[in-house]
Amino acid sequence: TTATGGTTATGGTTATGGTNSNGTTTMAGSTDKTWTTGQTIEAKCDIANQMTNSSKGKDAYQKAFEKKMNVKVSNLVAETFGCRRLTSNNRRLQSTGVNTKVTYTSPTAGTPPTPADFTAALVAELKSAGFDVSASDLTVKAFSSPQSATPTVSAAVGAPATLFFVAIFSVGMSW
């Protein structure tokens, strides 16, 4: 057998790696990890509310993200900011829009799309979902740097517990 998936001296073939659901080939021994990133999209409150309060809006965001990153989104949190009820729009002192947090799985963190690329993809998905929105209605900010959300297990966690049980056992043996 070979480690790279070639043919062996006896003529047998080994299989390593594979193809994931997105159609991309993974390296042998690689496993998908969980990553999180987020961003801010400045928009008028009516658009922000449509994006966060409807499943169509969240689905459109998720589809745009999945297409641009070529990953599978496992969780999307989208919340409006700055959209409170005021009697006069003249009193608004802050920007309004949507804050998002995206959790996705991929062997590597990948590179999030640029604001311009994501704006085009998001507008296309929102339009196909029936929203009346254009690129000028959204100010998409850059994504935060992806962070690993996959917990890492450390061997050092077991050491203090093991030491405790060895000490108790030793005391018990000496009686």
Image (tube, grey):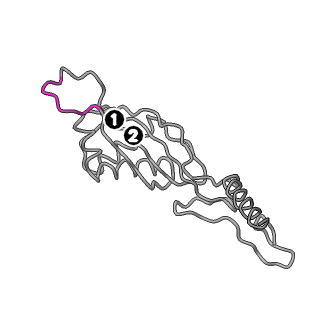
Q: Which residue is mark 2?
A: 120
Q: Residue sitting at 71 percent across and 71 percent down?
A: 15
Q: Amino acid at mark 2?
A: Ala
Q: Residue sitting at 45 percent across and 38 percent down?
A: 117
What secondary structure is found at the residue carrying circle 2? helix
- The chief SS type of the magenta part is loop
Name, please, the residue furthest toward the front. Answer: 175
Q: Is residue 109 left or right of residue 133?
A: right
Name, please, the residue furthest toward the right. Answer: 9
Residue 39 at x, y percent in the picture: 43, 37
Quadrant of the image containing the C terminus: bottom right
Spatial separation of the CA atoms under disc 1 and disc 2: 7 Å
> Is residue 101 rendered magenta in the image?
no
In the depicted structure, whether residue 16 falls above or below residue 134 = below
| Dot placed on the residue nearer the N-terminal end, 1 or 2 | 2
Residues at circles 1 and 2 in contact by the CB criterion of under 8 Å:
yes
Residue 37 at x, y percent in the picture: 48, 42
Q: Residue sitting at 33 percent across and 34 percent down?
A: 138
The range drawn in magenta is 82-89
Q: Is residue 116 left or right of residue 137?
A: right
In the depicted structure, whether residue 155 falls above or below residue 77 = below
Around disc 2, counting alpha carbons within 10 Å, would you say few (fewer than 14), some (14 to 19), or many (20 or more)?
some
What secondary structure is found at the residue carrying circle 1? helix
Residue 73 at x, y percent in the picture: 45, 54
Of the pair 21 and 134, the residue shown nearer to us: 21
Q: Amino acid at mark 1?
A: Ala
Q: Is residue 33 left or right of residue 2?
A: left
The dot on residue 135 is 1
Name, please, the residue furthest toward the left. Answer: 87
Around disc 1, counting alpha carbons within 10 Å, would you say few (fewer than 14), some (14 to 19), or many (20 or more)?
some
